């Protein structure tokens, strides 16, 4: 009998000195890769002493945790008792065991016989020896020691947001998300700090790796939320001078929450006074030449939020309280109109102050700068600088160049890969035929994936993915198809100009689409959509594009390496998108560093990747004006390369099969890839863990 190759790290030596100490202390746990989970008989006390031979002294003791024993589904509390069972084993070595039984009749009256203990214990070891990777307890497919706290935190924060937001219908069940009030921000801040304290009080050291990962993620999320609340508060404080009437409206809404009886005549007088304050503030603000656009947007949001809160207050009492209904409608309507006009004025004075260099693109964004990029990368657990990521992208681009030249030569175009790309683009299907072409490409990809036994695809996921067509308006921002619960197909419509129709068809030709259908459907975004709602859905709080987009992009990289692209045309189609993802890192980071203009970004996509110009313009507009974070375009290839690095470690290293690897990842739900890795390798985490995984080998 041989012990399975767990990797040899993290083994502990378990021993205590006296029976008295053993009776008082729980058994220190084996690591996740340990022998097995022990019997769940509370009266049973036994001693496991692990001896590894090659070591002159044993490693440090390791605490007992249920997740460290994945081979059975139940837990136990075990206590040492001297010299009952001594299994001796070492990874990769022959297992030998001896059993020493002392005074069994006295120690185990009315309990299970020692032979049964022996057979069960070594039956588990035999089961372990048949596995390449230890199975995970089903409990940890859905929960951890911290998952309840995560759910409670999310619900508590939502409860605060809901309660302190205006109710926009009389029945009180619909609410509206608006600019937060000072009172709401204070309560959100209180909740965040309360949960940080709860985390401090938790027993981190005795958690499973899944609990430690969730601890790390929740702490990171709370710190992020507290930072966002402070930023919101700081920005709000900069516009309070323009809304001196805000507190009076907040106080009216506060009375509405508990249905406090009001004097209609007094409320009417109060509303008339607020109208005067709004008109005075508006007249004063008219002399302001301009306002930084973020503050102008904040001012408009604050005033419209007050308008919604006033409506919530009015709807609650009007028609139900006779005195209120008599006095309030007219002053309410005047105040509502005044707030609306003032919100429009506030935004009209907004001016985009940007470091972006002037150009002819008509695209105007706001580069965030080096320091903000570094801050966001740290928050996403990416331990590289923007400059290092640009270097990474250029190295990956060089690989694509070599592969593209090979394919171009095979097609008879020599080193002029642009001509080879033109031939591929002109392979588009006629208008109206794209949906059936997409279906064929989907079936090709899924047949390949199943044939190589790469991942488990639930039959219901195959049955229920949908298909829709993208509107012409959407195609201006996103000229290619999208995915999620369904695939959204981008192709010409009758309302487009002829030139735009042709560019749409060329940009969505079958060879380009072949490389990305699985990105949008199965096992990409559609499988994420399916699985995220069924496994550890509480982790949706930890959304990151490096997992969402990285997972889907990873499948493009993996299938290329697996030989899914068999012809040079198919390789060019997949390489086009790979070059596109390299280009996204290069142009988006150079833009936010202040090095490039939007027009330079467009030209780079056309000249270096081979995009149609209209498609390149849509891509750049989407990147800088589409509401995406500065790192979103970086996340595709970076996240994909993180997963490829993890695949080399776990699959190429012989620790997992492809199916085990992919099934494990997709069931962990969204989170930074470094935390996915932590669950797979049972990484030793600390309470104050910070990113440290250098996943890219620049010398490779």
Image (spheres, grey):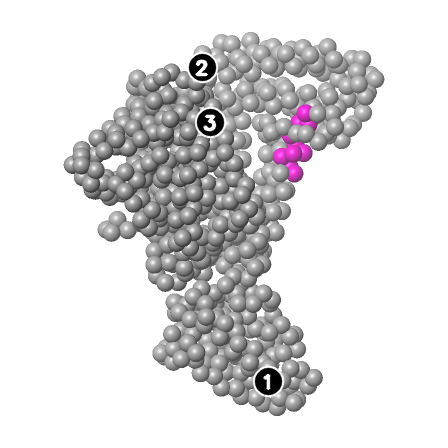
Query: Could you tell me residue 6's position as x and y percent?
Result: 41, 68
242 or 26: nearer the viewer: 26
Q: Which of marks 1 and 3 is nearer the N terminus?
A: 1
Q: Nearer the viewer, mark 1 or mark 3?
A: 3
218 or 119: nearer the viewer: 119
Query: Does the stretch in magenta take in 319?
Result: no
**Disc sitting over residue 470 in the figure:** 3
**Number of numbered discs:** 3
Q: Residue furthest left?
A: 414
The residue that mark 1 highlights is: 114
Callout 1 secondary element: helix
Q: Earlier in the sequence, mark 1 or mark 2?
A: 1
Residues under labels 1 and 3: Cα distance? Answer: 69 Å
Query: Which image quadrant for residue 43?
Result: bottom right
* Residue drawn 52% across the image and 78% down it: 122
Residues under labels 2 and 3: Cα distance? Answer: 38 Å
Observer able to see residue 425: yes
Q: Which of marks 1 and 2 is in front?
A: 1
The residue that mark 2 highlights is: 290
Q: Give the range drawn in magenta.
A: 159-168
Q: Nearer the viewer, mark 2 or mark 3?
A: 3
Query: Which image quadrant for residue 372?
Result: top left
Q: Which of marks 2 and 3 is nearer the N terminus?
A: 2
Query: Which image quadrant for residue 627?
Result: top left
């Amino acid at each position: 009998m041989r012990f399975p190759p767990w990797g040899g790290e993290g083994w502990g030596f378990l021993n205590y000195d006296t029976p008295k100490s053993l009776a008082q202390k729980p058994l220190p746990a084996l690591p996740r890769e340990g022998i097995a989970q022990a019997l769940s008989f509370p009266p049973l006390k036994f001693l496991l002493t692990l001896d590894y031979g090659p070591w002159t002294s044993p490693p440090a003791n390791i605490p007992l945790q249920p997740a460290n024993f994945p081979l059975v589904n139940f837990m136990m509390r075990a206590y040492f008792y001297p010299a009952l069972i001594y299994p001796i084993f070492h990874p990769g070595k022959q297992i030998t065991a001896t059993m020493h039984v002392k005074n069994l009749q006295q120690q185990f009256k009315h309990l299970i016989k020692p032979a049964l203990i022996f057979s069960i214990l070594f039956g588990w070891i035999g089961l372990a020896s048949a596995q390449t990777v230890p199975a995970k307890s089903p409990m940890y497919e859905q929960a951890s020691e911290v998952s309840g706290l995560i759910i409670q935190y999310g619900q508590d924060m939502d409860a605060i947001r809901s309660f302190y937001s205006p109710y926009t219908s009389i029945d009180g069940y619909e609410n509206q998300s608006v600019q937060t009030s000072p009172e709401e921000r204070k309560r959100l801040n209180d909740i965040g700090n309360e949960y940080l304290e709860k985390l401090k009080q938790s027993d981190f050291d005795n958690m499973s790796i899944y609990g430690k990962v969730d601890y790390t993620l929740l702490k990171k999320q709370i710190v992020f939320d507290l930072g966002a609340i402070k930023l919101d508060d700081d920005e709000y404080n900069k516009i309070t001078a323009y809304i001196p009437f805000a507190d009076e409206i907040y106080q009216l809404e506060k009375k509405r929450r508990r249905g406090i009886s009001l004097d209609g005549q007094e409320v009417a007088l109060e509303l008339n006074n607020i109208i005067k304050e709004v008109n005075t503030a508006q007249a004063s603000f008219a002399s302001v030449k301009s306002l930084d656009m973020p503050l102008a947007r904040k001012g408009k949001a604050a005033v419209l939020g007050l308008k919604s809160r006033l409506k919530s207050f009015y709807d609650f009492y009007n028609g139900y309280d006779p005195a209120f209904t008599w006095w309030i409608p007219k002053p309410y309507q005047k105040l509502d109109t005044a707030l609306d006009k003032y919100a429009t004025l506030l935004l009209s004075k907004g001016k985009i102050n940007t470091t972006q260099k002037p150009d002819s693109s008509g695209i105007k964004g706001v580069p965030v700068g080096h320091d903000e990029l570094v801050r966001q990368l740290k928050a996403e657990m990416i331990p590289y600088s923007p400059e290092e990521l640009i270097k990474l992208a250029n190295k990956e681009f060089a690989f694509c160049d070599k592969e593209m030249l090979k394919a171009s030569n095979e097609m008879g175009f020599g080193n002029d890969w642009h001509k080879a790309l033109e031939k591929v683009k002109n392979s588009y299907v006629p208008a109206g035929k794209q949906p059936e072409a997409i279906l064929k490409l989907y079936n090709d990809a899924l047949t390949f994936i199943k044939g190589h036994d790469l991942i488990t695809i639930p039959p219901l996921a195959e049955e229920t993915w949908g298909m829709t067509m993208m509107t012409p308006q959407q195609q201006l921002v996103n000229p290619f198809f999208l995915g999620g619960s369904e695939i959204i197909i981008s192709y010409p419509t009758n309302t487009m100009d002829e030139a735009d129709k042709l560019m749409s068809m060329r940009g969505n030709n079958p060879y380009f689409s072949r490389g990305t259908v699985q990105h949008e459907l199965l096992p990409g975004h559609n499988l994420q959509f399916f699985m995220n709602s069924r496994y550890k859905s509480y982790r949706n709080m930890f959304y990151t594009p490096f997992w969402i987009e990285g997972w889907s992009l990873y499948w493009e990289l993996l299938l290329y390496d697996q030989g899914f692209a068999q012809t040079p045309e198919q390789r060019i189609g997949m390489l086009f998108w790979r070059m596109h993802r390299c280009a996204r890192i290069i142009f988006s980071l150079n833009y936010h560093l202040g090095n490039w203009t939007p027009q330079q970004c467009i030209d780079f996509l056309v000249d270096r990747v081979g995009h149609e110009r209209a498609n390149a313009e849509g891509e750049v507009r989407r990147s800088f004006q589409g509401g995406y974070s500065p790192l979103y375009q970086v996340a595709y290839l970076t996240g994909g390369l993180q997963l490829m690095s993890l695949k080399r470690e776990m699959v190429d290293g012989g620790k997992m099969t492809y199916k085990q690897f992919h099934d494990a990842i997709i069931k962990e739900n969204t989170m930074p890839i470094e935390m996915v890795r932590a669950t797979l390798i049972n990484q030793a985490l600390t309470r104050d863990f910070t990113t440290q995984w250098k996943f890219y080998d620049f010398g490779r």
